[in-house]
Image (cartoon, rainbow, N blue to C red):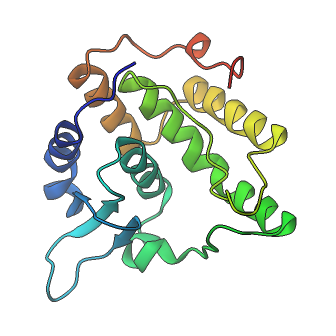
Amino acid sequence: MSEPNCTQLINLFNSLFRDTHNTVLVKGDDEPIYLPADENNPHHRVIFAHGFFASALHEIAHWCVAGAERRKLEDFGYWYKPDGRTANEQALFEKVEVAPQALEWIMAQACGLKFNFSADNLSGGIGASDSFRQNVHDRVHQLLENGLPDRHRQLVEAMLLEFKQPPLQAAQFSLEGR
């Protein structure tokens, strides 16, 4: 699968959410971050790293998961410990990453991309655990069966059209070969 154009994704996201949620997707130069509107910026900003499409999907997934109060806080008010986490810290990271990575997998499929699990802990030497992979997979299937939350559903439906992908089906999401 070839990677779609980030400009398409930015335009799609912004057309859906700039006016309705005062939020824009922004290509960043460095680390990804979510910044709420302030005196210098009239829009909330989902900033993704280095123009990477996968980074944009991941940050959008966090935005989709965050509730209204969290969207008022920088980086949604979540803790984040960078690369080099201990096994206990990695377990906590995996616990909070199940929902966003499940949404990211669904969006990747809607854009025609392969999804890769992210342990985000390269120097710690701890990759994504089998239980984490299974939990993300299970969450994807729950979302497909029960329906996506409104913002996410709206975005996925638009992605399917924009990137000319077939409707999502549970069979498209497998742990085989991941």
Q: In the image, what residue occupies the spot 52% across and 34% down?
A: 105
Q: Nearer the viewer, residue 3 or 97?
A: 3
Where 55 sits versus 33, above or below? above
Q: Position of residue 77 (x, y in %)?
A: 51, 78
Placement of the C terminus among the 4 image quadrants: top right
Q: In the image, what residue occupies the spot 46% across and 49% down?
A: 58
Where 178 sits versus 126, above or below? above
Q: Which of 121 and 76 is in front in this view?
A: 121
Placement of the N terminus among the 4 image quadrants: top left
Answer with the quarter of the image where residue 7 lies: top left
Q: In the image, what residue occupies the spot 71% across and 22% down?
A: 175
Q: Where is residue 141 in the image (x, y as percent from the top left)?
A: 64, 26
Position of 142 with respect to 12 (left or right) is right
Count of labels shown? Answer: 0
Position of 173 with respect to 112 (left or right) is right
Q: Position of residue 29 (x, y in %)?
A: 28, 65
Position of 91 with respect to 99 (left or right) is right
Answer with the quarter of the image where residue 24 lies: bottom left
Q: Where is residue 139 in the image (x, y as percent from the top left)?
A: 66, 36
Q: Nearer the viewer, residue 31 or 63?
A: 31
Where 151 sits versus 75, above or below? above
Answer with the quarter of the image where residue 157 lies: top left
Residue positioned most to the bottom: 39
Q: Which of 25 and 30 is in front in this view?
A: 30
Q: In the image, what residue occupies the spot 65% across and 67% down?
A: 83
Position of 37 with respect to 32 (left or right) is left
